[in-house]
Amino acid sequence: MEAHALKQALQAQAAHLGFDACRFAPAIAPPHAEAFRQWVAEGKAGEMAWLAKNIDRRTDPQLVLPGAKTMVVVAKSYAQPPRVETSEKEGYRIATYAWGEDYHEVLTPRLRALEEILAAQGGSQRSYVDTGPVLERDYAALAGLGWQGKSTMVISRELGAFFFLGTLLTTLEIPPDDPAQDRCGRCTRCIDICPTAAITGPQQLDARRCVSYLTIELKGAIPVELRALIGNRIYGCDDCAAVCPWNRFAKASTEARFAARPFAQGWLLRDFLKLDDAAFRELFRGSPIKRIKRRGFLRNVCVALGNTGGPEDLAALEAAATDAEPLIAEHAAWALGEITRRGCGGATQAWGTQREP
Ligand code: SF4
Ligand code: SF4
């Protein structure tokens, strides 16, 4: 098939599969390769050791797929209609991308379907949803799907900030699209709203301070000095994406599998503490949240309760403070100390003392 015809066939199939965009970049080194190396060298990736482990592959697509010519970049919106707001005291926040089904499960088979078209034309391919050795945001910008905003997220004129990216590297040559223009202008909303000051400047993220890192990627104890800043966020953070003015053009996702499941809103935080391993797995079956396991999730719930809880939460936290998992027990003890310190205590033990996990 001629290259332009192949491009059109891929775009048509991508639309048929439900992708909201499908664009093309040359398989050259990512423009932010050096900045990425520097970022990792400065330790700003925190415990995300896998980023450092395959840094050469991440900065050279030829090491990922020898002979690679083209990076196909697809996007799928997960924007959701606005929900009824709950008060900070009663509610909790889960990042929108995790309200529904795990996006890896939804998008990976569709990327494989695109691969088949290219394989039929004699290409070799590698495709990734988020987990591959590819600086996908760079290629999204190169392909003109959006630009890298000051938040470091890719922002699209059509899709706003709430979309997943998938990448497909192929040895076939497909005409590239034009890169996108940076349209952040003088806006600094994402930097200003960040609760932990993790965005240290335009396109500068210290992941070690980011709530998404702290509540998802970090396996151990959340640094005590950052716990209060996490507020009632129990899995990820939407703030820098939600505040972006380019969302005003975005429509809600058409993907029913990303729609909010019951756990996304309406539970009481203290009821999450009653989940044993089996109940946790059952509640979060097929959700990205299952990744952090019961120990990580209950750790986060304890932090949110420490920030927003009251006397009605003490019994559940006291039980959690004796959990066999030391990480949960320590964060529950911290939460009890915080509630007591705010004067809404009545706890029967001196919970203010920090225990090491
Ligand atoms: S996700 Fe939240 S904590 Fe992380 S950079 Fe954005 S606003 Fe800051
Ligand atoms: S909030 Fe403003 S500065 Fe941040 S990414 Fe969006 S447009 Fe750019």
Image (cartoon, helix red, strand yellow):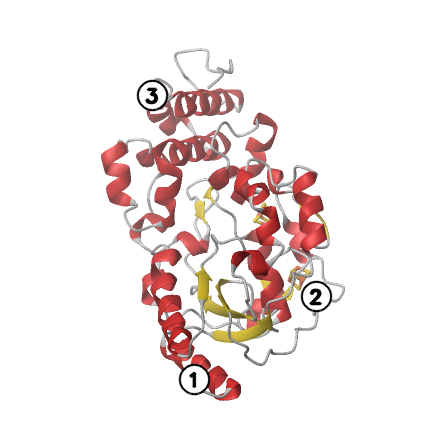
State which tag comes first along the sequence, 1 or 3: 1
How far, Cα to Cα, is label 1 from label 2?
33 Å
On screen, residue 111 above or below 303: below
Tag in front: 1 or 3? 1
Identify the residue at horizontal 52%, vertical 85% (top origin).
Answer: 3
Left or right: 343 in relation to 332: right
Check disc 2: other Cα within 10 Å, few if <14, some if 14-19, many if 20+.
Answer: some
Element class at badge 2 = loop
Per the image, label 3 sits on a secondary structure element best described as: loop
The residue identified by callout 3 is 323
Q: Mark 1 points at which residue?
A: 9
Position of 177 relative to 278 (above/below)? below
For the residue marked with disc 3, what is the amino acid? Asp
Q: Can residue 341 be seen in this view?
A: yes
**Mark 2 is on which residue type?**
Cys
Q: Mark 2 points at which residue?
A: 184
- For residue 116, side relative to residue 213 (left or right): left
Q: Earlier in the sequence, mark 1 or mark 2?
A: 1
Q: Where is residue 193 in the image (x, y as percent from the top left)?
A: 64, 50
Q: Is mark 1 on a helix, strand or loop?
A: helix
Quadrant position of residue 325:
top left
Residue found at the far right of this picture: 186
Ligand 2 is located in which of the four quadrants?
Answer: bottom right
Query: Residue 119: x and y, percent?
Result: 39, 73
Q: Nearer the viewer, residue 299 or 335?
A: 299
Where residue 285 sits in the image (x, y, percent)? 27, 47
Q: In this picture, is 63 found above or below 125?
A: above
Q: What is the crowding at mark 3: few (fewer than 14 residues within 10 Å), some, or many (at least 20)?
A: some
